[in-house]
Amino acid sequence: MGEDVRASVYGAAANLSKEFGPDRVIDTPLSENGFFGAAIGASAVGMRPIVETLTSFMWVGMDQLVSQAAKMRYMFGGQVNLPVVFRCVMYYGGGSAAHHSDRSYPIYMNIGGLKVVVPGTPRDAKGLLKTAIRDDDPVLFFEDGTLLGTRGEVPENGDMPGGDHLVPFGKAAIHRQGTDCTVVAVAGAVPLALAAATELETEGVSVEVVDPRTLVPLDKQAILESVAKTGRLVVADPASKVCSAASEIMSMVAEEGFWSLQAPMVKVASKQVHVPYTPALEKLMYPTKDDIKAAIKKTLS
Amino acid sequence: MAIEKSKLMLMLRRMWLIRNFEETVIKAYTSGEFGGAAHPYIGEEAVAVGACVALRDDDYIAGNHRSHGHPIAKGGDVKKAMAEIFGRRDGYCKGKGGSMHLADFSVGILGESGIVASSVPVATGAALAAKLQKKDFVSLVFFGDGASNQGACHEAMNLASIWKLPAIFVCENNQYAVTTPYKSTVSSEHIADRAQAYNMPGVLVDGQDCIAMFEAATEAVKRARSGAGPTLIEALTYRFEEHSLGLGRIRRSEYRTIDEVAEWRKRDPIKIHEGRLLEMKVASQSEIDAVREATKSAVDEAIEFARKSPFPEPSELYEDMWSDKSMPIP
């Protein structure tokens, strides 16, 4: 359910309405407090709703996400499960200005009670979404708008063991092995980190790219093992720099992997300002391939 | 409407259970047996009881911070309710919810919300589930006059109406949002008038009259179950105690007069109901006395149960966050 999902203005629910009918694909009013809450309530009594929204509209329904979805289970002593998924599309980098460019996933890491999923490849997007729908806890599934045109291999269900392509939560993907520096890359930063690693290879630098895929739960072990191998860490995160996903990952490595580090860690995140409309300024906002390359070199200098 | 004796006596029993429960809670709070906040429901018993007696066991309710009356009215266990307020392991929520979140899911309670109006969309979602699953349960939500001004409340009523959901919105208008009178915050004469905007019936009920409340709720339930859609009921009621225990400053505020409180106390919902039972010759005074005494014993047992129940162990701190037991502790 969501706004204009039958027409699927953004394409994520394309043709679902024709296939499943109006009882299962529901257009809602512009009413996030109302229909976020309705989805949560329906999930409390045996349904498995999927809500489609944009990150920027989540603020409008924030009370339902935080006071209800996140807290109900704990506050009521485990009496209820809420198997609800929010597909949260993040459009940024295309001149949408401050109200339509939010990369807000770190905020939900802070709340607790919400699983936070940030796929970086088409294969993971499919496998993680299927896992999210089957999960009995509330899941926020962040879809990075800069990745929407990405092409990549996606397994058909029939090709997989058990007939399902499922990617488990809390298991990072090592997209590229390396020995000199670890880059942990989140969502839209994944292809940038891979491109940076490819270019640096020609300069004789071996970069390992780790994609956490889910931030709650976070695969601490994979990150710590990679840092133990390379001794250096760059975290690339399209969210705003302060209290970002990168902040949490770096804090975790400082606490639990400090003695593996041979150089200070470097954070590559968005600038701590609101997204300006003009392309002249917006292009300065987000992590780039070159920023990541420079950060890797800094750890090696 | 002819109402069978068993229902009329159940109303009396549940109102007395709430009254005795609340009086015991006030004493326990005052003597320091538990802390935090607690919002007594004394004076408003007829609203929750009249509405809940009109429901089936498989119907859902949700409520708000003034959360002791709703679960008891729906048939929740008073021992577990008291243990929850005492922060004990045997409480409804294993001590994690406390006074503002008393919720017994085993009797169809979707939870009581400390954020006013926040549970209104959630209850509407249960009604959506009933419709989509083609089941005939209904979902009823209690909220106050203060909550009636929240966007969540309006959004939920609009959703319920456009989708013709089996939802019942019960506004407990106890005249004040903490200290602010509803007359100064609600733009229409009555909150029930707002139903017009959502194309649903808006019913104004004497919230001190349990039978009137039961009749209004029964009509709304019938409408909901038949697929005709939601109803808004505004119950005019009054909280006899202050907004919350532990807010001493309110007692010194002059937001309402002693005379006004005294006038409303003359309209005690339990006395009104007992008068009706005698007048209709449904019950004798001795039967009524027996109900009252039985509820006193039940509440005495509840507080003993709560006192004996252990506090949760430190190891229980992280329990219940996730249904997924493999979730790591960050």
Image: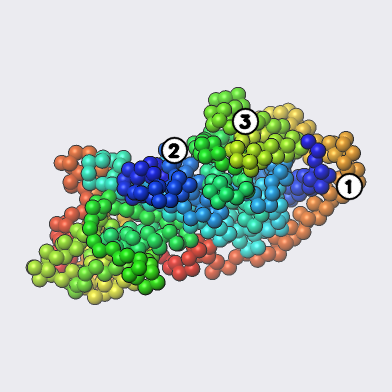
Q: Position of residue A155 (x, y in %)?
A: 30, 65
Furthest residue toward left = A203
Q: Which residue is mark 3?
A: B202
Which residue is more in the foreground, A95 or A276? A95
Q: Look at label 3 and name its amino acid.
A: Gly
**In the image as oriented, which residue stretches furthest toward the top?**
B189
Label for residue B128? none
Q: Residue at x 72, y 32 (%)?
A: B206
**Is disc 3 on the same chain as disc 2?**
no
Alpha carbon distance from label 2 to label 1: 53 Å
Q: Amino acid at mark 2?
A: Pro
State the CA–CA distance, disc 3 to disc 1: 36 Å
Between circles 2 and 1, the one closer to the viewer is: 2
The residue to which callout 2 is attached is A29
Work out whether residue A144 or residue A162 is closer to the camera in this orientation and state it.
Answer: A162
Name the residue: 44% across, 67% down: B327
Secondary element under disc 1, as helix, strand or loop, is helix
CA neighbours of label 1 inside 10 A, class few (<14), some (14 to 19), many (20+): few
